[in-house]
Image (cartoon, rainbow, N blue to C red):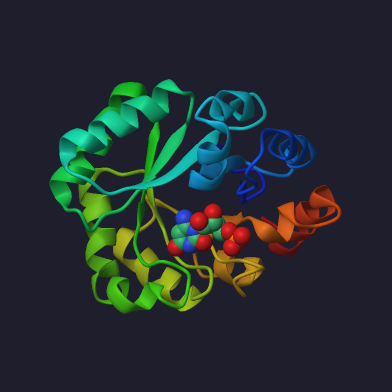
Amino acid sequence: MEKKNCLILALDVTDRENALRIANEVSEYVDSIKVGYPLVLGEGLGIVKELAELAPVIADFKVADIPNTDRLICEHVFNAGADAIITHGFTGRDSLDSCVKVAEEYDRDVYVVTEMSHPGGVEFFRPVAETIAQMAADAGATGVVAPATRPERVRDIRKIIGDDLHIISPGVGAQGGSAADVINAGADWVIVGRSIYNSNSPADAAMKICNEMKC
Ligand code: NUP
């Protein structure tokens, strides 16, 4: 994904009309639109193609299965028009390799979750986040997902992966994280959902975050 504004919209509304309205309003401020289960379960995978006309789409399906099932999921998602997929890493190297292989075949991107941004994200992920980050680098993933709610962890993870991998970082706004702080800590993009799509003016909210980051 091309870096212009360092902002990714997390589009977790559940209906097509709102999704397209918000995506249209903010498209000039975001480098990508992330869709996940809420919208895809609400409207079907076809929404990916519609959104992809406005911005590259990241499919946040946190893929976490055996290699063969992961392969089938990735193929489906890339065929639907997604530019990138988010996978878990705790399922192991063979599962991740399977996703990376499909992404290479389709010339698409894979981001691997390291430590999640919510309070419970430290319970199980904390002890393995660095190992997962190293595995993502070794496996040739595009980048990792790391928590904007803990910029110090973004800094730790950046040290592990170096400059070759990208860090995309959720947890800004509604979860308490600051966009400027996490960009300063080494994130390439922030992922923002509720602070934008629940705003009376999603475009103004997105513009404010862009200005704050001065990316
Ligand atoms: O660790 C993670 N935290 C997180 O919030 C990994 C994620 N993929 N996300 C997603 O980022 C979450 O599912 C949601 O789509 C988005 C953050 O949304 P919001 O808290 O800005 O509304």
Residue 182: horizontal and vertical position, in percent?
A: 56, 68
Q: Residue at x 29, y 68 (%)?
A: 129
Residue 87: horizontal and vertical position, in percent?
A: 34, 47
Closer to us: 45 or 184: 45
Q: Is residue 194 left or right of residue 151?
A: right
Q: Is residue 198 left or right of residue 38?
A: right
Residue 176: horizontal and vertical position, in percent?
A: 62, 75
Q: In the rendered view, tell whether residue 44 sits above or below residue 162.
A: above
Q: How many marks?
A: 0
Residue 5: horizontal and vertical position, in percent?
A: 67, 48
Q: Is residue 30 left or right of residue 145?
A: right
Q: Residue at x 53, y 68 (%)?
A: 148
Q: Residue at x 25, y 76 (%)?
A: 127
Closer to us: 30 or 88: 88
Q: Residue at x 22, y 36 (%)?
A: 69
Give the position of the C terminus as an image quadrant.
bottom right
Q: In the rendered view, tell whether residue 78 sits above or below residue 126.
A: above
Can residue 99 be seen in this snapshot? yes
Q: Is residue 212 left or right of residue 131?
A: right
